[in-house]
Image: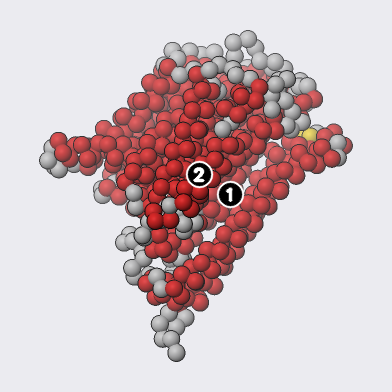
Amino acid sequence: MRSRTVARDLDEQTRLGAVYLDGLMRAQLRLSVAVLALTTVGLTALPVVLTLVPATRELSVLGIPFPWLVLGVAVYPSAWFLARWYTRQAERLEQDFTEVVESP
Amino acid sequence: MSNPLSLAAVVLVCLTTLAVGGLGLRLSRRTSDFYVAGRAVSPRLNASAIGGEYLSAASFLGVAGLIYDQGVDMVWLPVGYTLGYLVLLVIVAAPMRRSGAYTLPDFAEARLGSRAIRLVSSALVIGIGCLYLIPQFQGASLTLSLVTGAPAWAGGFVVMVVIALAVGAGGMRSITLVQAMQYWIKLTALAVPAFVLLALWFRSGAPSPQVDPSWHVPLSPTSPDDHPTYRTVSIVLALCLGTMGLPHVLVRYYTNPDGVGARRTTVTVIALLGTFYLLPPIYAALGRVAYPTLPAGVGSDTIVLRLPETFVDGLTGQLLTAMLAGGAFAAFLSTASGLAMSVTGVIDQELLRPRLARFAGGDVPGIRGFRISAVLAVLVPYVLSRVAEPLGLATTVGLAFALAAATFAPLIMLGVWWRRLSTWGAMAGLLVGGTAALSSIVTTMVVDDLGGWAGAILANPAMWATPLALATAVIVSLATPGRIPAGTTRTMVRLHTPERVALARSRLPE
């Protein structure tokens, strides 16, 4: 039976500690790459939609043309929601990690 | 259009900045107070301070000017400025705070254990800082000349003096308070006139902006040999990646209490920036209502300041102009003081303190060297702003982002996430990215108009210089596995392990 925590393995850089650190980094990086991929898709969607559906160029809501609404308004709340979602997920990952490495 | 109210607003903003800076003087005692405000700033205050520091002359005047000029395509700029924080959030926010470093050169040295990389990073901080300070001084000169008829050197000079005093007096603590206040000043100063102007425009029958159809279409060329898709993608990439490499942005992350706080701060920053950036397109569109084409001899950077008095005469117009002029000065002062603070820190630590210590036998009070550095940090960019050809405020700022994206962004991304980064790889990446971006930037600033693909590639280097630097760093690292720093694992444990996990050996003393 092990009586020491993984936290000590992390601290002392044992092979076990390295495995746990790799796991944490990989999970965090996967989350980050997902956010970046979503952002890229979101940004390229506007020119693609404008090209494939030319009618959207003429579309306007309350007198504001569609491209202005997307780039000038919709981008910001979307970025905020994405950021908040990422932060919660990252905190949850860290919470789980903390519980695992600190349990004896 | 000489306007005593505008002059009063500018003076008021400058005096307030100095007064709050003086408050910091009484609070600052230890050297660490000067650098990171004793590391006890709450996420909300910190987010306002980051917003206040980040919204510069480019955001307050330049963005609206460029949108007025070129249409919806330029809205990509504020989008990029905001998304830069999303990228920063997911790649570096928490690890950077946990690294325990004060500045970018500190981070580079702690991660790679190399004095040489520290020196190159320091030179880059000074370079990016100068490049970013130049348009702040130019914007100040342009604003003061427009609203008071002062000579062209005056506005930048005033900003230079106020910043040298504020930074030299209180350091970071004062700057945190000043910056947080500046965000709200800037938002109010841009929002209130925008709503008044919108109401006036609505009452006069809501005339449409006079534009040709391409103004409303993203990715439309501005001239026959323009390459709008390349240009836009490269600019957005530079802004998204450059944000994490700006010296005055990362220094703010050291004032968060922990990694979780750093992330929460960033989420609030995105909300604050998004709110602010709703406003510049309103000025651009109203600008096209008032001036279908730009009058001869008028730069598009002044369109925001010119609008109120074309919509309403007399006291109301003057009051609104005064608000905008005050807000613009708040923008110059806050960004310039944040940049000056970072550049000052580097000059103080790398150049001045070692020399002063040798000169006076190690008996120089640290604060005096810091104050001399503050003067140097603003004087050099001010002189450059007087001799350099103005490129447009947002364009020059874009070049600073491109330089940061091609140098610090690869270094930080690999440094935080890749264990096999070697000292040589990091150095090669910095040098290749720095040389590529700097030579493009200097060519763009010196040669007037290259045109065609050559012009597009040199004016927007991030698209090729950043991948080039990243690939160089990776290939050289793989070829020199013997140069991977010995402390890499310890650093990685420190960067990625949550603070709640107690680590006796891997944490740095706070």
Q: x, y percentage for residue A91?
A: 54, 65
Which is more N-terminal, label 1 or label 2? 1
The image's mark for residue B472 is 2
Q: Residue at x 47, y 43 (%)?
A: B429
Q: Residues within 10 Å of mark 2 (few under 14, many from 20)?
A: many
Residue B432 or B179: which is nearer the viewer?
A: B432
The image's mark for residue B86 is 1
- Indicate the quadrant where residue A7 lies: bottom left
Asked if badge 2 and badge 1 are on a common chain, one would say yes
State whether residue B97 appears in this view. Answer: no
Q: x, y percentage for residue B444?
A: 53, 23
Task: Residue lying at the far right in this picture: please name it.
Answer: A55
Quick check: A48 left or right of B262? right
Residue type at mark 1 is: Leu
- SS of the residue under disc 2: helix
Classify A25 as above or below B172: below
The chain carrying label 1 is: B
Quarter holding the N terminus of chain A is bottom left
Quick check: B349 left or right of B245? left
Q: Residue at x 74, y 33 (%)?
A: B218
Q: Residues within 10 Å of mark 1 (few under 14, many from 20)?
A: many
Residue B352 or B64: which is nearer the viewer?
A: B352
Quick check: B100 left or right of B146? left
Task: Residue lying at the far top in this picture: please name it.
Answer: B296
